Amino acid sequence: MGTGYKCGSPTYRSILENLSNLKSEYTYNNGYFFEKGLGREHTRDNYSENPLETAREFYDKLTYGGIESEFTNGKGLKTRMADGTIVSFRETSTSDGSPVVEINIQKSSNYGDLKQQKIHFVLGGNKE
């Protein structure tokens, strides 16, 4: 955190620049990653033997080249991408206690077919 771009990227990147690699590595369908979870349409679930590790890995890959900062309450991280997309990461969701990554495209200028979503990383099953 601090100065520079996330994960050592030499450039400030957009979400769209990172999306193609993720689409081939993780389940992606109709603008959403993973399976529909409980709750609203935008809530997704990814099952993993190590949810926290999997969530951090996904978050880091999705936000490569962004500018990361901590939440003012200290309970998570957020990364702003060059196109305006904001991706947040919390180790503990307030709804179910799982690690969660949220993708907010409301202020994005170019996000392709990606949809706004909240992804919970839960214990069990196969790693995506």
Image (cartoon, rainbow, N blue to C red):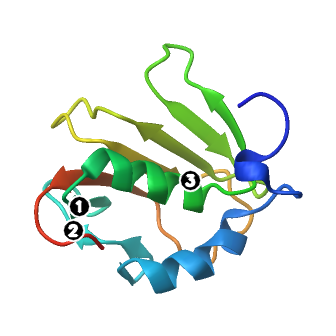
Q: Badge 2 local density, few (<14 within 10 Å), some, or many (20+)?
A: some
Per the image, the residue denoted by label 3 is 60
Amino acid type indicated by mark 3: Asp
- Comes first in the chain, label 1 or label 2: 2
> In the visual, does 120 lie left or right of 14?
left
Amino acid type indicated by mark 1: Asp
Amino acid type indicated by mark 2: Lys
> In the visual, does 105 lie left or right of 45?
right
Q: Are marks 1 and 2 in contact (CB under 8 Å)?
A: yes
Q: In this orientation, which residue lies closer to the viewer: 124 or 19?
A: 124
SS at badge 2 = strand
- Comes first in the chain, label 2 or label 3: 2
- Comes first in the chain, label 1 or label 3: 1
Per the image, the residue denoted by label 2 is 36
Give the distance between the C-alpha atoms of the residues marked 1 and 3, in whole angstroms: 18 Å
- Residue for point 30% across, 42% down: 99
In this view, 7 is above or below 36? above
Per the image, the residue denoted by label 1 is 45
The quadrant the N terminus occupies is top right
> In the visual, does 3 lie left or right of 116?
right
Camera-side mark, 1 or 3:
3
In this view, 126 is above or below 37? below
